[in-house]
Structure formats: C-alpha cells, structure tokens
Image: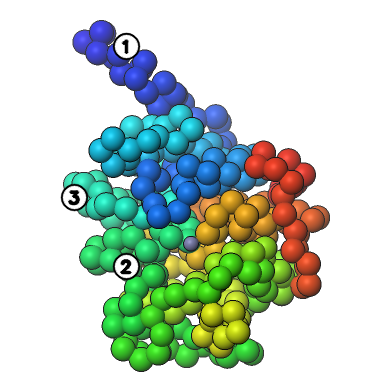
Amino acid sequence: MPTLCVLLALAFPGADERPEPGKLRVLILDGQNNHDWRATSPLMKSHLEAAGLFEVEVSSNLPAGGRPGTLKTAPFPPRLEKYAVAVLNYNGAAWPKPFNADFEARVREGKLHLVVVHAANNAFSDWKEYNEMIGMGWRGNTFGSRLAFSPDGKPSLVEKGKGPGAGHGAKHPFQIVIRDTEHPVTRGMPTEWMHTADELYHGMRGPIKDVKVLATAFADKKKGGTGEHEPMIWTVAYGKGRVFHTPMGHDVDGMKCVGFQATLQRGTEWAATGKVTIGLPKNFPTRDKTSSVGSATGKGSPGG
Ligand code: ZN
C-alpha cells in the first residue's frame, strides 16, 4: 500500500518522525475548551521547548467544523504509545470510549503520565477514572470532598455537601505558598512567590485519593475567595501513573508568569521521569514581586 503510506505521510507530516535522541515526548491535548486553547497551547509548547528537554506534539479534538489552532497537529485520537506525558489543555466533549480505555490503562500502568492545567480539571465529570487521575477539580459541592488549608498549612478535609464548591473571583495576582519544599518540582523555589494575575480556583472537589499538595494560595474573601488557603499545585498517584496538576493558567497573562513556566517545565519533567533536572530561572518571582516572560518565545527564561 505505498500510495496510502505516502498519502498518510502527506496528511500528517511529522507525526511519525523519530524523536530527537534524549528528548522526552510530550503530547498536548486540546481542541475544545471554554478557554483560549489556540493561544495557550502554543505558549505552553514554547515554555516546554525552552527547557531543552522536551519534544512537543499537539493533538486537537476539534468539534465538527471547528476552527483549528495554529500548531501543526498529530491526528486525533493520537497514538498514545509515542508519548511519555500528556499535557491536558482540554475541556470539551467526551473522547471516544476506546481512547479513554487506552488512556486509563496507560496511565494506570505508568506508561503515560499526565499534566493537568487549569480548565482541564473542569472536564469529564462523568468519567470516574478521570476524577481519580486529577484528584480534584471544578465540580459542585455535592460532588466530593475538598481540601482546605489553615494559614500554617494544616490541611482539613471538608466533606461532600459542606462548604463551597468550585469557583473563583476576578483575576488578580496572588501568592503561592510552597507546602512541600522537598518535592522535586518545588525544591529550591522561594517558599512564597507572587503569581501574575490569574484566576484563583477554589473549592476543588473530588475523590482526593493519593493526592499530595505541594503548594496553596490564600483565596481572599475580598477578592471573591473562600478566606482559606486553596490547593494550587498537587500530584496524584494513579496506579503507577504520575499526575501533576495545577489550577493556574487561565490565559496567556497567567501563563506568562515565570513561576508558571518553571512549574510547568518541572512538573512535566517530574511526570515523565519522576525526577527534576530543570533549574529555576534567575528571574523567578519573589515573595512580593511577580515576574513575566517577555514574549511567548520563552526567551529570557533560562529555566535549565
Ligand atoms: Zn479560567
């Protein structure tokens, strides 16, 4: 079938290229979102490529007649066996059932690891295994438990039906407080650092199984929050799969934060390998000052 092969090669150029030696293969899944995935996926791709470790491909599950993004894409559904880690930038219609089954199995067996960004945790509320993979996400207060933290970092589990469900106030800069200074992703970060204006997700709900919270943020009532510290970076162990989750990253402004960029790079490396070799950039935000990358090219951000 030489003709078919040629046609496929023309239709999906690059989809079957061998990875650059030593690079970790990353797949961004997007194509539907109530957020601007056409702008944020290219920015995340450039953030990851700036670290020098990753080769990034994108697969967009467009709705019928949907306008594609600007990135060259692998077909959807993608061949998951090619990738070490999937970055989820998707909040839309259910994926095909056979793909979900393959996805679940690969994550459970540790063949594919995940990075969950912002509204990806709004997706798939009816998919039981997805809820376990993300740990907690944008759900109503009757959906599952929630984790709230005192100012000194003591977690309390708030039962289903009690307290707020998911929400956020208007975008504003807020401080990230590192709660686990030994985890490879957060090690070496200032214990408090200012994130650029973003939505501060609160009241995340879910099964919260095998979840480890690495950082929180205070959701000020005056800014539409809960008056408590909310989980802001966490990991989930799903079988042998490593899941890295951040509810930060509402839009390009939030993602231009050097702290977001470094967190995404390190979280993705950790998900893919269980380790982090990527250093922190010199212009990392401080306790009082935000820091943004100058452009979507990732330049000006050493990041390792
Ligand atoms: Zn948002």
Q: Earlier in the sequence, mark 1 or mark 3?
A: 1
- SS type, badge 3: helix
Residue type at mark 3 is Lys
At 79% from the left and 56% from the top, the residue drawn is: 283
- Look at the image and name its color scheme: rainbow
Percent across and percent down for residue 282 are: 81, 55
Residue that carries the numbered disc 2 in the rendered image: 131
Q: For mark 3, does the 10 Å Cα neighbourhood hold few (<14), some (14 to 19), or many (20 or more) residues?
A: few
Of the pair 103 and 145, the residue shown nearer to us: 145
Residue that carries the numbered disc 3 in the rendered image: 97
Asked if the residues shown at circle 2 and circle 1 are in contact, with their CB atoms under 8 angstroms apart, the answer is no
Residue 199 in view of the camera: yes
- SS type, badge 2: helix
Q: CA distance from mark 2 to mark 1?
A: 40 Å
At 31% from the left and 18% from the top, the residue drawn is: 8
Q: For mark 1, does the 10 Å Cα neighbourhood hold few (<14), some (14 to 19), or many (20 or more) residues?
A: few
Residue type at mark 2 is Asn
Up-down relation of residue 200 to residue 262 (above or below)? below
Q: For mark 2, does the 10 Å Cα neighbourhood hold few (<14), some (14 to 19), or many (20 or more) residues?
A: many
Q: CA distance from mark 1 to mark 3?
A: 29 Å
Q: Is residue 22 left or right of residue 164?
A: right
Residue that carries the numbered disc 1 in the rendered image: 6
Q: Quadrant of residue 192?
A: bottom right
Percent across and percent down for residue 59 are: 39, 38
Residue 129 in view of the camera: no
